Image (spheres, helix red, strand yellow):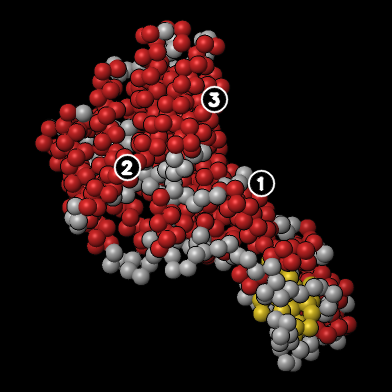
Amino acid sequence: MPQIYRRLLRLLRWRLWIIEKLRPSPWQEMLAYAAVAGILGALAALLFRHGVEIIHYVMTGTGSGMVDSFRELEWWQRLAIPAVGGLMAGLVLLFGKRLHRGQSSTDYMEAILIGSGELPVRATLVKSTAAMFSIASGGSIGREGPMVQLAAVAASQFGRWRQLSAPQLRLLVACGAASGIASAYNAPIAGSFFVAEIILGTIAMESLGPLAVAAVAATLTVRTLSDAHTLYTVPAFTLHSLWEIGPFLVLGAMAGVVAPWFLRSLRQAEQLFAATSLPVPLRLALGGLVVGGLAVWVPEVCGNGYSVVLAILNGHLIWQTLVLVLVCKWVATAASFGSGAPGGVFTPTLFMGAAMGYLFGFGVNQVWPQGAADPGAFALVGMGALLAAASHAPVMAIIMLFEMTLSYDIIMPLMVCSVVAYYTARGIENQSLYSEALKKKAAEAPEPVTLPGSVADLTRSPTSSVTLTARFEDIARQFLSSRHESIYVTDAEGKYAGLISLHDIKPHLNDEAVATLVIAEDLRRDDVPSVAPAATLADALRLFAQQAGQTLPVVDPATGRLTGVLVKNDLLLALLEGRGAEKRGATRSPWQGS
């Protein structure tokens, strides 16, 4: 018996033992991939954050917060820096087209919902670099959108390296998006529900489990590598009287009315800037000039408004100042968004909600003190209510506000107010923060993209195969060079003849003399059902229910040839996506609002 042959048998025995004792299930593998995607997403988000800080320091000469930096500048610097930043962002976008020529502008929501899960790297890097200039120069735009996009790209690249199927890759990109939200807001639960509720449209454990793992891995990574903490440190809020529920309900209705008008103003600003027909750099410079002009008198309009929200929640702004800041911030956000500045409006939406809620609570307090004992509580609830109304995701809004503040006492009014705001906004207009851009993407597609409806849509390339006369040594080498637990058998004409399972060769691994005499014909099984490429997913699911394997051979009934293999995990993920699409009803939009 040759020594190399004994070595083959020994290696096969080890592989079989590992599979039987230690081999994880496909869902367990997906959780491991999700954890890696979470770590990569957190690293990408941290790199973007540091890039913004460096550019901001170069442009302003100070490393303090955005609003504090602009307060220290001369009036002409407040006017010029946002315009210069917009111009630089536009130039990056203009000349960056040469770097990603031929690549699509696919963003993470499109890749998850109507794409294959593949995201363009160069196009994303160009757009993210432009976003750095817009954000660092004081644009009234959030940094969360680019952070989520970069995290999703990192997950997509990792999934492509692991050669995951399209359904698995889409889920991994969703995990990357969840890690980006968790990294931006230090809120792992909200990151999971953001993707589950808004993008996937389902909270089934098959998808929510990996999302949660990715978000937790990202949060732990950020907390390890930075000084991450509770995003909004606020005083303890309590519900002083049951009478306060009435004003909270009114605030919810108010947020539900304001949100559609806020979204309409952003779209109208976009149309106004497009009507100028200016080149992209000049259009972004004009948007920055509007922000800079407002910042000359009201520097609080610069940036995403984080520091101002903290001041509102802690009662450090008088109402007269807050009215001016609210109006100017609305105009500045519309100018930044409308000019095409890459970024997000998620945090500016929280800003608008906090200002609106505080002003409402202060007004009620002046007329009826028992109805609004603490206006700061109304600011906090207003954040969640406006976010719920704008995003059409009340569960995510409630969880996010709780995670960002860790203020449990405010949960009851926050829940009621967010739900009222959501239903009020839906009654006025069935458009959310995420509806418009993806609708444009779908309209630009040459053909309507539908969910996989047949086995052919999910078929992977054929795995390892041998002929009926293949020797045991050849079969052993195939198993050792493949990750799969089955090898397909074909006859001399290439027609499908059955399969050999790794477990089927187990009796021969300890009998070397018999193993030398065995050929594929002796080991093959013909009791495993095959499925036709034109069969429906429901037919394939019924076949999987009749046998315990994780794969089905895909055989062309006309020729009898093996065309590929259908993996059970791919089928389940595709069916899960189908249920989510039905619940979602309407498509949603990419990374403007992330």
Give the residue type at disc 1: Met
Numbered disc 1: secondary structure? helix
Mark 2 → mark 1, Cα distance in angstroms: 36 Å
Indicate which disc, 1 or 3, sits on the residue closer to the N terminus.
1
Vertical order, 562 against 12 (above or below) = below
Q: CA distance from mark 1 to mark 3?
A: 26 Å
Callout 1 crowding tier (Cα within 10 Å): few <14, some 14–19, many ≥20: few
Quadrant housing the C terminus: top left
Q: Position of residue 128 (x, y in %)?
A: 34, 52
How would you rate the neighbour count of disc 3 (Cα within 10 Å): few for under 14, some for 14-19, many for 20 or more?
Answer: some
Residue at 40% over, 56% down: 440
Report the residue marked by disc 2: 266
Q: Position of residue 224 (x, y in %)?
A: 48, 39
Q: x and y percent of residue 576 in the render?
A: 64, 54
Residue type at mark 3: give it. Val
Above-or-below relation of 466 to 459: below
Q: Does residue 233 appear anywhere in the picture?
A: no
